[in-house]
Amino acid sequence: MSCRNSRVTLFAILYMKIGNPFFMIDFFSRSLLSQPVVMATSDDMLLDVCSWLPAKSIYKFKIVSRLFSDFAKETYFISKQTQNALLKDDTCFFIQQDAFLRGNNEFYHLRGKKLSSGVSNDVLQFLSNSAKILASSNGLILYQTIHQNRVALFISNPATKFWLSIPTPKPVSENPYADIKISLKCDLDDCMMFLFYTCPDDWYSYYCKVYLFKEGVWKDKEEKFFGGGRNLIFDAPVHHNGVIYFISDSFPYVERESVYFKPYIMSYDLNNGKSRNLKVAKEARRGSHDFSCEMRIFNWGKITSSNRSICLVRLRKSVFTIWVLMKYESSLWRKILKVRVKAMGIIEEDPIVTGFTVLNGDLLIFATKKKVYSYGLKDEQYMRIQEIGEHECESNVSFISYSSTLRTCDVKVENL
């Protein structure tokens, strides 16, 4: 390895260890950029190394470095940074009170990630005062505002402060105060939004509209989504292998003789429009009608893993139980954890959980009435509790994971 390339590697290592961008700029300018000869191949390597940095750090570097200012404008660099971000864990998340219009949005980092990711205070203030976050994917957030009974939808990158107005589909504009059943999925080559709304002549089914960013239009899916006889929880979808999954509620309003008496999972294949029922774990069905019971599904495993799946999390009588789907065809689940909230190591007298999620496929994030915690589900972090911070969202909170990227709102990200 050349002396210059060694310095590039050292730059990356120091950043990961120190995380101070201004210190790194000083190191960068004194050692790396002071070389009399700059080779094209080294510049390419420098671009590749820097593309692994989060958007927050890149924008800090821009203040004192023309090099980084130029990087942040290059389509290739933006695409490369966005691609690399897809391979990394989300480092932060929003929580908001599960209210109708405004979510009282608060922002949190995972432990040790505060220096490398974040959202500016003015963006947070706007989101808290004027918007409700509906979804997030690969650095973009989808949010809604309502003014004079008119709903407006926007896609935004909080890190770059770019935003894009989305045409409001008719089912939303005609019912401005109804819950919006919508999800967002951003891959390397495109972003898509999926809107579900009830069929007026079939209360068990939903129409589906897809917003294609490349074309800037909403298109109807030909096949309806069959949701079964229970209400589905649309604000917690799981995207997995081209299929979107929703879990039903578990409240005891369905007759015992009905095939929908117990909670279930419904899937909708985004390619062929087929709907399919997936049974939840047998143990999870027992006692599911208890009013303290709450179940959600999440992605399981890292995005780079070949063994990604779905996990089912149940909170009942202050006990977390988690299963992982092992075989889709036979609805075979494996239990990986059962723990009482008080036994998790929380230093609270009577902790009451007000919301939970699974972040990055292996980390349980949950809130009590006062604080937010993380709890490891795999490997060396298994059953390790960490306090993330205090919150002011009161009860019924929801979580929206977030990653700091340069992703643009209206330009295709090329597959590199």
Image: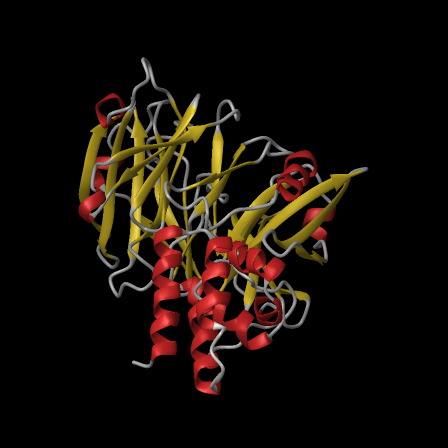
Residue 230: x and y in percent read 44, 39
Nearer-the-camera pick, 133 or 92: 92
User: Residue at (51%, 66%) from the top-left corner?
Assistant: 29
In the picture provided, is 378 more to the left or to the right than 349? left
Q: Please name whichever residue, 132 or 149, is drawn nearer the observer in this view of the structure.
A: 132
Task: Measuring from the top left, give residue 67's x and y in whole percent.
Answer: 58, 70
The quarter of the image holding the N terminus is: bottom left
Q: Residue at x 21, y 24 (%)?
A: 343
Q: Give percent across and percent down for residue 112.
A: 37, 43
Residue 250 sits in which quadrant?
top left
User: How is the model colour-coded?
Assistant: secondary structure
Depth check: 21 or 196 in front? 21
Instruction: Name the outermost residue toward the right.
Output: 148
Residue 43 horizontal side relative to residue 266, left or right: right
> In this view of the protein, can residue 362 be seen by the observer?
yes
Q: Is residue 384 above or below residue 119?
A: above
- Is the residue 153 above or below the residue 215 in the image? above
Residue 341 spot, x, y in % from top left: 27, 25
Quadrant of the image occupied by residue 352: top left
Please identify the quarter of the rendering in which residue 216 is found: bottom right
Number of disc labels: 0
Question: Horizontal placement of 30 versus 411: left or right?
Answer: left
- Identify which residue, 182 or 118, lies in the foreground: 118
Residue at 41% in and 65% down: 242
Visible residue check, residue 260 = no
Q: Looking at the picture, does residue 404 appear above or below residue 215?
A: above
- Spot the residue most to the top: 349
Name which residue lies at 68% across and 36% down: 177
